[in-house]
Image (tube, rainbow, N blue to C red):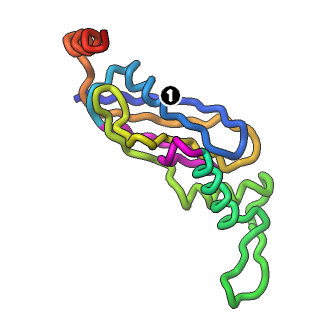
Amino acid sequence: MEQILSSLSIATPGEGFINITSEINHWIVTNKINKGILVLFVQHTSCSLTINENADPRVLEDLSTFMKALVPEEGINPMPGRKGHIPYKHSEEGADDMPAHIKTSLTCSSLTLSIDNCKLNLGTWQAIYLWEHRSQKHSRKIILHAIGEIQNNNQLSKLSSKAS
């Protein structure tokens, strides 16, 4: 068993989903990880990681719409039967900052996935997304920590001959 610890930087254009599946699979192939476990961790408090559908973009649109309704930028709307609107106390970094922190708390900052035959073991319609919760561009850092079996030259030769 080997361990590989690395990072990946992702530039975000602002709020939304960025499919990072191919970058992760490329990292796995580059590091020759045949079988193992991969932990992904995003080092930020206003974006998250999620696994979701990669076939119909309306799924991501609906997720974004739902989250915006659940966590409005204007502050907290009390539960039914309670009076008054409660503005966020943390607002120095912009109107979208505190809602982004809440969205991150409701989602995931890390994922654990299986690697098999040098690729992520995902379902047919699944992809890994970096979900940017802020409206401005950001550079996000994802830590990749793999524990597993590294391919030796014999395994690489067998895979190459199967691919031909």
**Mark 1 sits on what residue?**
23
Q: Would residue 82 appear left or right of 127 to someone viewing this image? A: right
Q: Would residue 82 appear left or right of 30 to someone viewing this image? A: right
Q: Residue furthest front?
A: 56
Disc 1 residue type? Glu
Q: Where is residue 125 in the image (x, y as percent from the top left)?
A: 45, 43
User: Considering depth in this image, is 42 or 121 the residue closer to the camera?
Assistant: 121
Instruction: Please check the rendered image and state whether residue 152 is part of the magenta-colored stretch, yes or no.
Output: no
Residue at x 56% of width, y 45% of height: 56
Report the quarter where the C terminus lies. Answer: top left
Q: Would residue 18 appear left or right of 162 to someone viewing this image? A: right
Q: Position of residue 132 (x, y in %)?
A: 64, 45
User: Considering depth in this image, is 93 or 110 the residue closer to the camera?
Assistant: 110
Residue at x 32% of width, y 34% of height: 115
Magenta stretch bounds: 37-56
Q: Where is residue 139 in the image (x, y as percent from the top left)?
A: 66, 34
Residue at x 78% of width, y 71% of height: 87
